Amino acid sequence: MVIKFICTGKTQEAYLITGIQLYIKRLKHYVRFEFIEIDIKKPLPDKLQQLKSESQSILKHCQPGDTLIFLDDKGKSYTSIKFAEWISKQLHKPGNLIFVAGSAYGFDAALVKDSPSISLSSFTFTHQMVRLIFVEQLYRAFTIIKNEKYHHE
């Protein structure tokens, strides 16, 4: 299994890039992990067209049998412990686990239909900050699964 994290747009801030790279390096001790940024060079004038274009780019990184999970403020909320339990269960399923962070416009409704979504918080974060927060939480989940000293409860 590979865990992929697909993000729409490029990470611009150096401090976020540094943090993301730190957690990606740490994650590779636990799982095959791919961080994929889909660069949309010139946004389309119509929001629906933009979302469809982003969806097509996301789907290019997916295979039949993969599980797509969308990061969305309206998604299911987890504690770090519950998220680790959920991740642990997913690791035994066939296919890849693909988390997707969309652009400021969200997601094309056709793409997210019948797929689960996860909320990182009731707060709203920039789509660039979500990347760092998510990879840290994924790393935290693996340290919880392995019963390592990182998470304190």
Image (spheres, grey):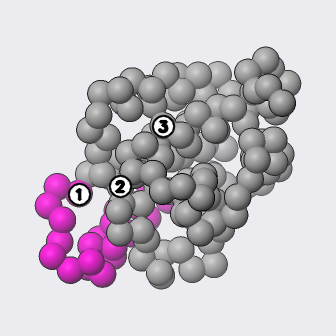
Q: Secondary structure at mark 1?
A: loop
What amino acid is labelled 2 in the image?
Thr
Name the residue that disc number 1 marks.
Answer: 40
Residue 41 lies, in percent from the top left, at 17, 55
Image: magenta residue range: 40-68
Circle nearer the N terminus (1, 2): 2
Question: In whole angstroms, how far apart are the C-alphas of marks 1 and 3?
Answer: 20 Å
Q: Secondary structure at mark 2?
A: strand
Task: Specify the label residue 132 is tagged with.
Answer: 3
Circle nearer the N terminus (3, 2): 2
Crowd rating for badge 2 (residues with CA inside 10 Å; few <14, some 14–19, many 20+): many
User: Which of the 4 image quarters holds residue 129?
Assistant: top left
Instruction: Name the side, left or right, on which 88 lies relative to 41.
Output: right
Q: Secondary structure at mark 3?
A: helix
Instruction: Name the side, left or right, on which 94 lies relative to 114.
Output: right
Quadrant including the N terminus: top right
Circle nearer the N terminus (1, 3): 1
Residue 120 lies, in percent from the top left, at 60, 52
Residue depicted at 30% across the width and 51% down the height: 9
51 versus 32 height, above or below: below
